[in-house]
Image (cartoon, rainbow, N blue to C red):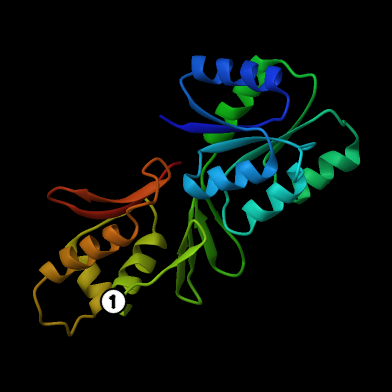
Amino acid sequence: MKTIMVVEDEPAIARVLAAYLRKAGFDVTLASDGRKALELFAQKPPSLILLDVMLPHMDGWEVLRQIRETSSCPIIMLTARDGIDDRLSGLNGGADDYMSKPFIPEEVVARVHAILRRPLQWTDAGRQSRFGRLSIDFLGQRVTLSGAEVTLMPRDMAVLLYLAEHPNRTFTREQLIENVWGTDYEGSDRAVDLSIKRIRQLLSHWPAEEGEIRTLRGTGYQFWIEN
């Protein structure tokens, strides 16, 4: 079950949103101020955040900024202000959508569904790719998960980079040996299985709904991501 975090300081609005989201099959966590939202996010990142702009202690813009430093978690901004400048500030700051109050709860739920259906992968010119909470810098050979760096052995890094460059494509052990270990490798092809096992252990906190390294029995391995 996907979790939606509702960050809203007006109890009535928070209760209504929570009720509609739960009816739609989501789990819901509530935060009434910006600091609490960041605290809950650090403990367990949700699948999506509904984030009010006008919050006590820390406003929604600052919460958005801090989350975007480490995560691509989808965020829909909620606000009573409907000016174009506010909309542009939210979208330029990394928000995925922007809704003005008063809103229809059914429309909020529809927007949530629409955003969660979007592909999670994006690639920029710098050869950095993000798959939900997993970020891979191909040129720098650096991997982070929820903002924390993941330290891999050189060979395991090479395996992960190769698979991630070809998402949703299946490779046999022999293909991985040829393309990662090299044609002059004379060891056992079980080295592939051990490498995949170590990578999976290090990525164990990567949410399965965002992606995973799959074993296709009798075929090979695949870096699977949601399309």
84 on left or right of 101? right
Q: Position of residue 206 (x, y in %)?
A: 39, 51
Q: Is residue 145 above or below residue 156?
A: above
Q: Is residue 25 above or below residue 149?
A: above
Residue at x-position 58% and y-position 21%: 18
* Tally of numbered tags: 1
Q: Position of residue 28 (x, y in %)?
A: 52, 27
Could you say which quadrant of the image residue 19 lies in?
A: top right
Q: Amino acid at mark 1?
A: Arg
Q: Position of residue 190 (x, y in %)?
A: 11, 67
Q: Is residue 72 above or below residue 166?
A: above
Q: Is residue 46 visible?
A: yes
Looking at the image, which residue sits at the far front? 57
Residue at x-position 40% and y-position 61%: 164
Residue at x-position 56% and y-position 37%: 48
Q: Which residue is mark 1?
A: 155
Looking at the rendered structure, the secondary structure element under dot 1 is helix
Could you say which quadrant of the image residue 122 lies in?
A: bottom right
Could you say which quadrant of the image residue 75 lies in?
A: top right
Q: Is residue 94 visible?
A: no
Q: Is residue 139 above or below residue 78?
A: below
Q: Position of residue 72 (x, y in %)?
A: 58, 50
The N terminus is located in which quarter? top left
Frontmost residue, 26 versus 178: 26
Dot 1 crowding, Cα within 10 Å, few <14, some 14–19, many 20+: some
Residue at x-position 15% and y-position 71%: 191
